[in-house]
Each structure stands twice: as C-alpha cells, then as structure tokens.
Image (cartoon, helix red, strand yellow):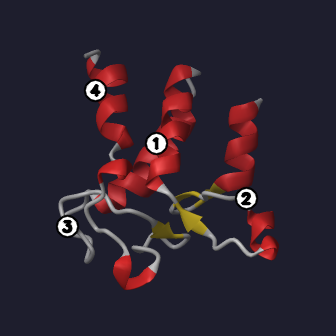
C-alpha cells in the first residue's frame, strides 16, 4: 500500500520526485533526488516490488549511466530536474556519492553479496 502511494504521488517519467506534486504550492522545487530515491529503491527490493525497482533504475539512474547522454560524467549526479536533466544549477555536483544507492542495492539483491 505504501509503495503504490509513493508511485502514484511521486513518479514522473524521469524518476521519483523528492516531494509530492502538491508541495510545489508550499514553495518546494520539483526535483528528483537520487539520494532519497536510493531509499525508495531499497524499499522496493525489500517488498519484492520489481516494477518499482525497475522504474527507478531505468528512469533515473539509466540516464546518468548512459555514455551517450550529453551530461554523462561516469558518476551519479546530486539531483535532477523533473525532465531528467542535472538540477539546481551550476553548483550541482555531477559526481555525488550520496546518489549511488543502486550500487549497494544491486550488489545485495541481484548479485547476493
């Protein structure tokens, strides 16, 4: 039930928003946080929700790991816009360790290590 609510309220084509769409009226910027989404991914694996795990991996982290992407750096970005571009302007880190949630989760849940 919680996972379906997260999917319904947060999913956009480029990943999962850090805050619900309704929070924009409260002054929050609509961004995608790979850090927060790492916990979302962990919850999806823990609850055997492969659809959500695949959506997060393919919609968000896939674009960052695609060498054909114009913004490819070989690292995971700090934040993304709702369109999947690097977010927050010139100060955004394009190589941010907090965005590496899939590394541990894929190692644990796919490789079993």
Q: CA distance from mark 3 to mark 2?
A: 28 Å
What is the x, y in percent for residue 65?
26, 56
Who comes first in sequence, dot 4 or dot 2?
2
Q: Which residue is mark 3?
A: 73
SS at badge 4: helix
Which comes sooner in the sequence, label 1 or label 3?
Answer: 1
Q: Residue at x 28, y 26 (%)?
A: 107
* 42 and 50: which is toward the camera: 42
Q: Distance from label 4 to label 3 (Cα)?
A: 22 Å
- Judging by the rendered image, the residue that carries numbered circle 2 is 20
For marks 3 and 2 on the same chain, the one whose residue lies earlier in the sequence: 2
Extreme top residue here? 112
Spot occupied by residue 28 in the image (x, y as percentages of width and height): 69, 71
Percent x, y of residue 90: 36, 84
| Contact (Cβ within 8 Å) of mark 4 with mark 2 | no
Q: Which residue is mark 1?
A: 38
């Amino acid at each position: 039930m919680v996972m379906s609510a997260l999917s319904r309220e947060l999913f956009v084509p480029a990943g999962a928003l850090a805050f619900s769409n309704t929070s924009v009226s409260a002054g929050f910027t609509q961004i995608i946080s790979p850090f927060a989404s790492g916990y979302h991914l962990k919850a999806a694996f823990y609850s055997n929700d492969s659809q959500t795990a695949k959506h997060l991996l393919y919609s968000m982290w896939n674009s960052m790991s695609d060498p054909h992407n114009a913004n490819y750096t070989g690292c995971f970005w700090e934040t993304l816009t709702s369109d999947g571009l690097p977010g927050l302007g010139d100060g955004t880190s394009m190589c941010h360790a907090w965005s590496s949630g899939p590394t541990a989760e894929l190692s644990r849940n796919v490789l079993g290590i």
